[in-house]
Image: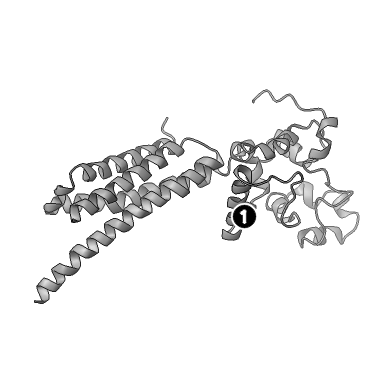
């Protein structure tokens, strides 16, 4: 089956072959046909191939595998396999409430390489720190976790809107929706990536890995 | 001179595209960095050099027409 990466690879190979043809025989530009070929080989096709490649890389950066390939993220990856229903990331990951192959990106949509240009610059800084700098022992988010990440799935869902604890106090749901009361507040859904206590946990024997 | 510039431009592009090809199958941050930092730079350099060559080739022709 042809995948998008295969199609991009074919396009890039084709583009490289066209550029190589001009490199070998630049004299082809002496004719009108040759000049058109060179225009395609040195401008149009490389731009297309570069854009397709960039798009493919951005898509790959959304994969769980991409995030967990950094050593510092290993513990966070392991926290997805915690065998405890109170652990929010674990229960979402194990039950495919988020796509397992895009677990990180689904709940951290604005984080580093996934966000706007400022976030992307932070993402590049992370890569720099990973390979050149000093990796901090304790990792924390730049900003408080926004309820927006939860609400883009849960908002309007019956289990969320009619949840018993959400409706004990009529002020709770509006505060959650307005991001004034965090979903991961103490006493609510606070168990998120508890990496400090991973050694005390048992893990789900994931058969699909 | 024009052919030499075209050859350099094409070589930059071919090298950049090869870097892109080799990084395409990896889902690691290093591959992304290599693609952007080296592949992107080579592709951009090749395109800019080609456009500059094209411009240098077009400008004298326009002058000749004016004469």
Residue A8 visible at all? no
Rendered image quadrant of residue A201: top right
Q: Is residue A130 visible?
A: yes
| Occupied quadrant, residue A20 | top left
- Pick the residue in front: B15 or A113: B15
Quadrant that contains the C terminus of chain A? top right
Q: Position of residue A76 (x, y in %)?
A: 72, 39
Of the 4 image quadrants, the one containing the N terminus of chain A is top left
Residue A71 located left or right of residue A24: right
Where residue B18 appears, as percent x and y from the top left, is 37, 40
Judge from the rendering whether residue A204 lies leftward or rightward of residue A197; answer left or right: left
The residue carrying pointer 1 sits among few (fewer than 14), some (14 to 19) or many (20 or more) residues within 10 Å by Cα, namely some
Q: Residue at x 39, y 48 (%)?
A: A50
Q: Position of residue A22 (x, y in %)?
A: 22, 45
Furthest residue toward left: B67
Q: Which sits in the foreground, A153 or A114?
A: A114
* Circle 1 SS class: helix
Q: Chain of mark 1?
A: A
């Amino acid at each position: 089956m042809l995948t998008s990466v295969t199609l991009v690879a074919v396009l890039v190979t084709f583009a490289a072959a066209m550029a190589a043809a001009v490199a070998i025989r630049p004299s082809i530009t002496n004719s009108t046909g040759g000049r058109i070929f060179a225009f395609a080989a040195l401008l149009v096709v490389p731009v297309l191939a570069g854009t397709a490649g960039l798009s493919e890389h951005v898509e790959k950066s959304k994969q769980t595998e991409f995030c967990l390939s950094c050593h510092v993220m290993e513990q966070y990856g392991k926290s997805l396999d915690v065998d405890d229903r109170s652990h929010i990331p674990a229960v979402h990951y194990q039950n495919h409430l988020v796509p397992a192959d895009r677990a990180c990106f689904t709940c951290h949509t604005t984080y580093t390489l996934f966000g706007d240009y400022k976030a992307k610059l932070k993402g590049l800084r992370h890569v720099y720190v990973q390979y050149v700098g000093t990796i901090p022992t304790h990792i924390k988010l730049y900003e408080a976790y926004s309820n927006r990440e939860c609400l883009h799935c849960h908002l309007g869902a019956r289990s969320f809107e009619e949840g018993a604890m959400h409706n004990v106090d009529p002020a709770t749901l509006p505060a959650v929706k307005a991001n004034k009361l965090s979903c991961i507040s103490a006493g609510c859904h606070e168990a998120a990536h508890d990496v400090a206590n991973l050694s005390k946990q048992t893990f789900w024997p994931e058969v699909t890995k | 001179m024009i052919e030499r510039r075209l050859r350099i431009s094409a070589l930059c592009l071919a090298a950049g595209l090869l870097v892109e090809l080799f990084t395409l199958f990896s889902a690691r941050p290093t591959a992304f960095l290599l693609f952007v930092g080296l592949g992107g730079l080579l592709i951009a350099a090749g395109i800019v050099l080609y456009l500059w060559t094209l411009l240098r080739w077009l400008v004298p022709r326009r002058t000749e027409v004016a004469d």
